[in-house]
Amino acid sequence: MPTVHDARDLGDFLRTRRAGISPDEAGLTSYGTRRVPGLRREELAQLAGISTAYYTRLEQGQSQAASDAIIESLARALRLTPDERAHLFELARPRPADRRRPPKPEHAGPGVVQLLEAMHDVPALVLGRHNDVLSWNALGHALLAGHLDRQAPDAAGPDRPNLTRMLFLDAHTRELHRDWADEAATSVASLRYVAAHHPDDPALAALIGELSLHSPEFAALWARHQVRLCSSGTRRLHHPVVGDLDLSFEVLHLPDATGVRLLTHTAAPGSATAQGLALLNFHTL
């Protein structure tokens, strides 16, 4: 099984980021006709204070031993966000041998499942490293995947529900999201971040390969190499039973399970969405 990323990903990331910065934004004077958008290699190297030859080797994947100072200089020159900066470090630094061990299988512990079941009025799920659904409560199931079997998270491998796969390949999930394009872009940007931290995860590599093959939209978003972690926000849904819902979501990392997260959805008290959730909860009884 191939790794999730290789030396070429560092070059892809650097190219896509420098393509997104104009000379004017970088405070440089532009001369002549530009065949490609953004900064030239020599311009970025100048801004980062490194030689063009060395930067070219980095972008061509010929060097993965850049110092922290060089990575920081590139991050500043490219105006990276904190998530993008962390991603650059992950791609540019050599990995210790123990980082290449495949991650252990994931599961939701009995205490976490008990917590989910106690949250009667809150749609909640437990997610794995790359968005496998490890468990959900009745309301979480009814909100996001009522068309699937309630016991589906108990399955193994590709038969287990995965929110990213569902977003791109499941017609019900696509129709559920009123802002599908934004949701899809955020999902892929988050998966990019995770992939850099788990380069030898065979399940993650299989998921990325499957989605790249079967979803041109996923493939196009993956090629953009956007990186972003989203731990809270608003999710606008059109539910087939209760109609439009505007929900606040929070992603909470569980302290004793690396990469395993609790995803919750809540509504403003007294809002139409709160009434819709209450009605949906009634249907689950």
Image (cartoon, helix red, strand yellow):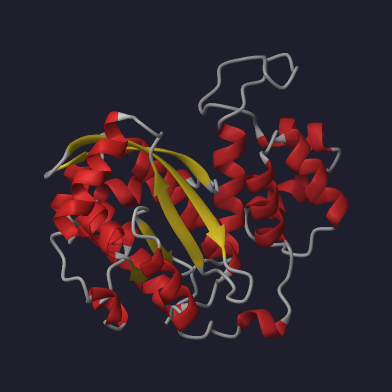
Residue 5 % position (x, y): 52, 66
Q: Is residue 29 above or below residue 204?
A: above
**Which quadrant would the N terminus be assigned to in this image?**
bottom left
Q: Residue at x 44, y 57 (%)?
A: 263
**Which quadrant would the C terminus be assigned to in this image?**
bottom left
Is residue 111 or residue 54 the one in the foreground?
111
Residue 223 % position (x, y): 42, 48
Regarding residue 148, the answer to whether it shows in the image is: yes
Regarding residue 133, the answer to whether it shows in the image is: no
Residue 187 horizontal side relative to residue 230, left or right: left
Residue 224 % position (x, y): 45, 43
Q: Residue at x 64, y 54 (%)?
A: 87
Is residue 28 or residue 100 the one in the foreground?
100
Q: Residue at x 23, y 39 (%)?
A: 276
Residue 87 horizontal side relative to residue 209, left or right: right
Residue 103 horizontal side relative to residue 23, left or right: left
Task: Please tell me how many numbered marks the rendered image carries.
Answer: 0
Q: Is residue 211 above or below residue 74?
A: below
Q: Is residue 34 above or below residue 108?
A: above
Is residue 51 or residue 209 the one in the foreground?
209
Q: Residue at x 55, y 22 (%)?
A: 34
Image quadrant in which you'd find residue 124:
bottom left
Residue 73 % position (x, y): 82, 42
